[in-house]
Structure formats: structure tokens, C-alpha cells
Amino acid sequence: MHRILVSDKLGAAALERLKEHADMSVDVKTGLSKEELLAVIPDYDALIVRSGTQVTAEVLAAAKKLRVVGRAGVGVDNIDVKAATMSGVVVMNTPGANSMATAELTMALMLAVSRNIPQAHASLKAHEWRRSEFVGVQLYNKVLGIVGFGRVGKLVAERAQAFGMEVLAFDPIALEETAREMGVMLVEMDELLAKSDYITLHAALNPSTSKLINAETIAQMKDGVILINAARGKLIDEAAVAAALQSGKMKAAAVDVYSSEPPPADHPLIGLPNVVHVPHLGASTHEAERDVGIQIVGQVVAALRGTDYTYAVNMPFELEGDYATVRPYLELAETLGRLHAGLADRPIRRLEVEVQGDIVGGLVRAIGAALLKGLLEKDADVAVNYINAPVLAHERNIAMTQTVGINSLDYPNLIAARAVCDRGERLLAGVLFGGTEPRIAQMDNYRLEARPEGVVLIMQNRDVPGVIGQVGTLLASYGLNIGEWRLGRNKPGGEALSFINLDAEPAAEALRALTEIDAVTQAKVVRL
């Protein structure tokens, strides 16, 4: 049974969806203090939050069982993603579920600040009639600069164009072709600042975008520009924006988000007459709250079951194709890693990986992470998964490289991994028969088709008559049943390698007896 803690408000539909899963147990505990969260988090496998709960390194250190943190929303700045990665905790968000709500709020703020709607409403509510004081500006024929051309940015662009606005966008990773098809011009930041009548922010918050709007960038803007921020409060230098609003450099601003929430009483923007401010309402629609809750529930359940990791923000790779198709290849790579670990008699310093085939061709990074997971999980002090395996490997000075030509097989969708130690190397290659049945196809220079599961006896011997009979008789004398025996040899009368699936693990005494057989040169047991 997987235990899930919901520490921020989640919609009723999402909670009902959680209760439908018999293998999931959910507790809703909102409004927890830091101390209360630290006290309860060790009992849970997953944590679902919104923006209220601070998932700090201290919380993650206390969460010994935690495997998944799900953020019902886009931003994960309330989660220490680096600490989560080091702990092997998957961090997930829901980037598409509330995009429409945020885009619509952006347009609402743009209209409200352009037409002085909040101020006019307050005036009339006070029984005043001062129409001439609330003359606004139109969106039609104005230039809108969108900083961040992702899901929300694209939705805002479509809606702004419906108002007759010309749209510019700045985003270092946006595709020129996509923007062109939408009638949006991708420009550099300097050009956007200089040409825009309105600037709206939809960029992710990271070290390079923190205080992106500051005294220097404001100086590059048109006089009388209007700023909209419904993304992240820390994208702007709030004091610098306040100064620009007071000096007249900026005509007006509309803000939904703040560098600290709730904002302090002396916040520089709150109370300025040319600022519209609302309390982080971007995702606050019934539809968005329902959708983000249902989406994060599905993602967390899938991650706990190990069936999918959609929108995992700290996954060290992106998957091409459906996860259900890809997963067996990652599991095969894990098995190769475990087999390498079991056979190594010295520390492995480097893993070289080669993939060949249409399916695995785009999965090198994913397969590398899976290889490292299998290699490290036996001896690691923490639970190893795809998230932290590359980090742990780096700490242990294990290098991972992509290579070509290390195997001699012509199977479709083959994974080969060569482990390099101080005094030698070992090559393992595996395939999936029918896309589902894993087989070890090569061990060093030996070709075979072995089933990598359960207890496996790896034995090397001189290729002479009678070895199979002697080994079978000896194993029987110790009550060990052979499930399957696969053998490869380099040449007749040369060296042979056996991959023997056993029903039980042999005792040390049985292994010693095996090595006393004259033709047997090595015997090792690996549990896969």
C-alpha cells in the first residue's frame, strides 16, 4: 500500500480519484507548520502540494520513504529540486493543466489595467462619477512583447491577436517555425523591450531569469510601457518596477504574483494608483483546479507504480515514444547493470554504452541512467532510481560514455554495455525478443541467448568432454535444480561460458566444489 500525503488544498474530484485506487492510501493534512510536516512526512511514499507547502532540503531529509513529490501546478520553486534529486525523489508538475486559466487571467489583467477598471469600480462604489479620470487605452494596434513562449505564452499570443495586437516573443528555446506559423515574430530581448507597448512575462524562474525585469532592462523599454506579470514574482525587481511606475517611465502594471506570498504590508507595488494587483489567481478557476488535481493524482499514482514519469522535472533524460514501449528496454538496461555489478571483482570506473535500432536509438541517456541504477542499487546507502543514479555515479567517479562498435551482433534494438575496471573490462549485450522477452545475447566474446532472471550461475571452463555432466551431478548432490542452461564457446576445444538459471542460490560450499572440478576455471553467482 502506497501512502500519499496531500498537504495543500486539492479539488474534490482529485481526492475522489485517489480513493479509487486500492493500492493507494491518502491523508489530507493542510495548513501544517514546518514542525508538523517534519513529524509526519517520514510515513509517506508521496507528497502532493500546491504553492503553499515548502518542500525544503530538511523536509526531504526527514522523508525516508518519500519517492514522489507532485506539484499541482507549474512552478516548483517551493520545492528544493536539487535536494530531491540527490535523495532520488521524483519531482513532477502539471505544466498544461492550468495554462488556459493563466492565459485568460493575463488578458483580464491587461484589459483591467488598460481601462482602469478597478479604479473606476472603486470610485463608483464610493458614489462618485468621474468618467474623465478613467480614460484608458486600447489593445488594438498595440505591440505585445511576450517573454517566454511556452504553453501559456502561445495561448496569450492567440488571444492578443484576436484583439488586433502585433505580437513579439522572446524565448531562447522556442522554434522559429512554430512562431512563424502563429504569426508571431521571435526577437531578441533587447528588441522586445524597445518595441513593446505591453510586456507580459511567462518565463520559468531560474537563476538566469531571476529579476529579469530590473532597472537596466526597464531603461531599455518604451516610455509609457505597461507590464503584466502572472508568472512568478521573482521575475521582476519589485522595487525597480515601483520606481519606474512612480517616475512615469512605466504607465501601469498588473501583477498576480509576488516575490514572497502573501506579500508584506510594505510591498512596494501594493497601493500604487497605477497598479492592478490580485492575490495569485492565475490557476484559480474551478476548471483549472479540477484539472491540475486530477492530472497530478494520475501522475503520482503512475510514478509510485513505476509505470510512467510524465512531467518529472528532475528526470535526467527525456523519453521518445510511449513509456510502456520504452520501459522494457530500460528494465533490460537495469539488468545489464546488475549483472555487471555482480560479476565485477574490482570497482568499475567507466561504463561505455552502445545502442542500435530504431526504438533504442533515441534513448541513450535513459538507458545510461538505467544501467547506472542497476549497477549501483545493491551497495548504495540510499534507494537508487533514474533520478539520482547519474548523481551517485558522478560522486563515485564512474564515467558514462556513448560508443560504437563494441559488440559483434546484428540484433535489432540491442543494448551493449562495456564496464571498464582498473585491470580489465567486460562486455554485456542484451536484446528483447518480441519487444518483451529479455535475453543476454553476448558476454565478452561468447554468444548465447540466456534468460536474465532469478539466481544465475556464471561459469567458465575449458571446452572438454564431460563438464556438463560433472556440473549437473554436483549441483544435484547439493539439491540445486537447474531451470535453464545456456552455453557459448569461443571455439571447439577452447573456452566455454555457461549461463545457468538455478531455482535456489547455492551455498558457498557448493561453489567451492564447482571450482574444484578440473575443467572449471571460474564460477560466480548473481541474483537478478
Image (cartoon, helix red, strand yellow):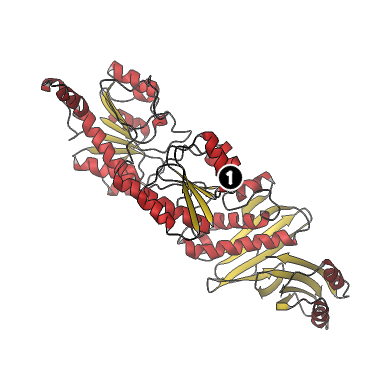
Residue 160 makes an appearance in the image: yes
Query: Looking at numbered disc 1 in the image, what kind of residue is underneath it?
Result: Pro
The local secondary structure at tag 1 comes to helix
- The residue that appears at 73% across and 71% down in the rendered structure is 504
Q: Is residue 53 above or below residue 266?
A: below
Q: Is residue 137 above or below residue 408?
A: above
x, y percentage for residue 316? 54, 49
- Would you identify the image quadrant in which residue 221 lies? top left
- The residue that appears at 19% across and 39% down in the rendered structure is 163
x, y percentage for residue 164? 18, 39
Q: Is residue 201 above or below residue 14?
A: above
Residue 184 makes an appearance in the image: no
Front-most of residues 504 and 83: 504
Query: Left or right of 43: which side holds 466?
Result: right
Front-most of residues 116 and 205: 116
- The residue that appears at 45% across and 37% down in the rendered structure is 31
Q: Is residue 419 above or below residue 256?
A: below
Query: Left or right of 344: which side holds 466?
Result: right
Q: Give the labeled residue for mark 1.
A: 42
Q: Quadrant of the N terminus?
A: bottom right
- Would you identify the image quadrant in which residue 418 lies? bottom right
x, y percentage for residue 149? 35, 42
Query: Left or right of 5: which side holds 165?
Result: left
